[in-house]
Structures are given as structure tokens and as C-alpha cells.
Amino acid sequence: MSQLPRNLRFVIAQLDFMVGDVPGNASKVIDAAKQARDEHDAQAIIFPELTLTGYPPEDLLMRPGLHRAVTHALSDIKSQVGGIDIILGFPKQIVKHSDSSSSGNLFNTAAVIRDGEVVAEYNKCELPNYGVFDEKRYFTEGVDPCVVDIGGVSVGITICEDVWVSENIQKSKQAGASLIVNLNASPYRIQKSQEREAQLMSRVRESGLPIIYVNLVGGQDELVFDGQSLVMATDGTICQRAPAFEEGLIVVNFDIADDGSVIPQAGAVAPPLDETRSIYNALVLGVKDYINKNNFPGAILGLSGGIDSALCLAITVDAIGADRVEAVMMPSRYTLDMSVEDAQQQAELMGVEHHVLPIEDAFNSFLGILEEEFSGTEPDTTEENIQARCRGILLMAISNKKHKMVITTGNKSEMSVGYATL
């Protein structure tokens, strides 16, 4: 008579970490690990790539102080959390001393922490060096697979782009892995989630091993990370998918069959967003994190009554709330009454603070100063641009005084030809 399957429970920590805030990131790890242990009775919790530094840390990796902070953070995590395995990413520096100097290698590393000890480490093998990625500037490539026993299951640890190369998964399988865990900091772009899932499907079908894919969420400078962490079975079925652009702790369960194979249980599969909603949510999260991570108390923008500024206002309100947003209408002699009315109506409907600051006097003052320079010429785009610059001066003055961030309202067509006025 065959035995009933055993169970294994992990928690995916799809969380938002801030680049450079090592103590804050470590505190977030500790809180999430305790919650996974105490509320979800999980054997392990999995965090994204470079959890402790945030991603991408870039030239912060060249600062000794960052590595001291990482060492301290690891000590805090090891001393404060027990009873659950913690899988997380961090930069690991291996220093080599000689008679005349110190040198060494830096690795993009994942560690498994168990009851105060690091029981396994893995160094990322595939270092992307294209587009927004510059990892070969900082890191040394890893070579060896890492397989660690968690709850009686042999788990192969990989990081991000490692899973895009079949050889890395095969190495883990040959080392005895029954399940692959993949830590990620994979930024959003249109159709990226479909590309990831296609790669994961290839890996599970080649290897016959299920994969837990854990991705970062949040905005960091010009990048936005969309999350969409998932669990994929060996036939390519997505058994669980976390919502896009949202933080969360996602419980994932597995059955362990008599032959040792690991079978994901069905869980919540968040539906993929359509392209428009996906882009909009990425913009909202990017604006939210840029404002909050840089400690701006709020945002200000010029509201014209046109589509571009209307969309920017909607994004900003959804990002940080109407109570932190200020809209300014700045009409001139060329502004239609309808434009001001439309702008005021939107501001009122969305509940934002709004003001009308006419720029006619400022515009006339500039024309007066330039009267001799412009003598004998006809009005053209020069005067139109002066209007735009008058508005920019007002917005930046309010920003400087109130410390609110200015939201620019140029569209991609304008940006593509180099037209953008602050």
C-alpha cells in the first residue's frame, strides 16, 4: 500500500526593496520571515535577487560601507529569525590578501539561512550585460550548482537569467535537485511576462522539474519591476501566479510523491493584465516609488485641459493619493476658456488642490525685454515656447518652495524629437 504524499510549504516574498537601504531591507526580510513562519507555517521563504541591497545597486557595490552594511544585515537576520529557512539574494565579496594589496571577487549570491547559519550559497552564473543590465562590470560569474535539502526535498537554487540557459538547470538536476527555485529582479516591459513564461516552460519540460519563480516588485529610478511571481509544473502549467505590480506573501504548497517527485498544488492564478492596464499600472507604481523613495511630500503638475496632462494627473493621484497632489492651471492669451474649464472640472472630480495662475503678465514682461531683439520679426513658435517656459518657472518655484516633485506632462512623441519643456 503506497503512502500518502508528504507536503512542503514555501512562501514567495514578492516585495518592494529600496536600493541602498540595507537596514530597511533587512528589517523587511525579518518581518516577512516571521510572518511566513508564524502565520503560514512555512518551511521556507524565498526573496528576490539582491534582496539586501535592492536592485540594481550599480556603483554602490564599489563602496566598502555597503558591504559592511550587508554583513551586519546578514548577522541581524541570522540572530533574529529561526524555525524557517530564508532564501535571499545579496552581493558576496570574497577578499584575497597578498603582501602588497587586497583584491577579490564579488558575486551575485543567493544564501539559504537556517537557524542562525548559512547552510548553502549559490553564485549567479549568467550575468546580463545588455540594455539596462551591467552586471559584468561588478560581478564574477559563478560556476557550480547549488542543491540544498529543505523539508526533505532537494532544491536547486538559481538566480534570474540562469533559468534562461538550459545547462544551468541540467547541472542542478544532475546534482540531485527535485525542484528549482529562481530568484529574480526582472524589470517590466511590454510582453516581458510572456517571454519569461515561455523560457520557464522550456526549462520545466527539458528538465522534468517544477520551478518557483520569485520576482521583485516596485519602482527604482527608471526601472519598474512587475512581480508576477509564479509556480510552474513540469508540463508547463502555471499552478500559481502572483498579481502584477503588487506586494504580497504568497503561500505555495507541494505534494511529495513516493518516488520523490515534487508536485505543485493548485493555487490562485492572477490573470494577466491586458497591455493598456499593464502599462498604466507600471506608470503608477513607478511614479509612486520615485516620489516616496526620494521622500517628496507630494507632487505638482501643470494642468492644461488637454489629454496629456489629464492622464498624468490621473496616474499621479492613483500613485500617491489626491491629498498629496496639486494642479496648477496657467492660462495665457492663447488659452481657450474651455481648456481652463476642463482642467478645473477634472481637478474637482479627482479631489486635488488646484489653482489658476495666469501667465499673461509674465509673458508680456519677457516680450518687453526681448522687444529690441525681436524687432522686425513675426510671432512664431518662439513666443509659444516663452509661454511654456513661463509655466515651467512657476512650477519649479512652487516645487522649490513646497518641496513637491514636478510631474512633467510631455508625451512620447514630443520626447522622441527632443521637445520637452520644464
Image: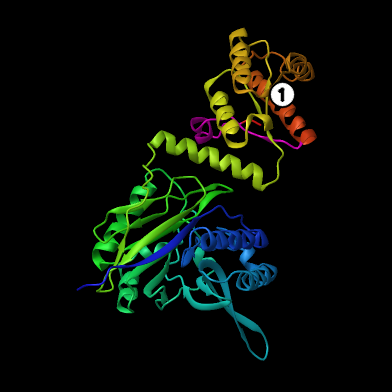
Q: Is residue 164 visible?
A: no
Q: Is 412 inside the magenta-drawn segment?
A: yes
Q: What residue lies at 59% left-to-right and 33% top-to-bottom? A: 316
The percent position of residue 196, horizontal first and vertical second, equals 36, 54
Q: Nearer the viewer, residue 146 or 255?
A: 255
Furthest-top residue in view? Answer: 337
Note whether 413 is above or below 344 in the view shown: below
Note whether 225 is above or below 26 in the view shown: above
Count of marks, rendered view: 1
Residue type, label 1: Cys
Residue drawn at (74%, 17%), measured in percent from left and top?
Answer: 367
Q: Quadrant of residue 256?
A: bottom left
Magenta region includes residue 390: no
Which residue in the protein does label 1 denote?
390
Tell me which residue sits at (27%, 70%) in the image.
261
Please say whether residue 351 is visible from this viewpoint: yes
Characterize the magenta stretch by its predominant secondary structure: loop
Quarter residue 52 falls in:
bottom right
Residue sticking out furthest to the left: 1
Name the spot of residue 362 as percent of width and height, x first: 77, 18
Q: Which residues are magenta?
A: 403-420
Is 113 on the left-hand or right-hand side of 365?
A: left
> Is 157 or 78 nearer to us in this picture?
78
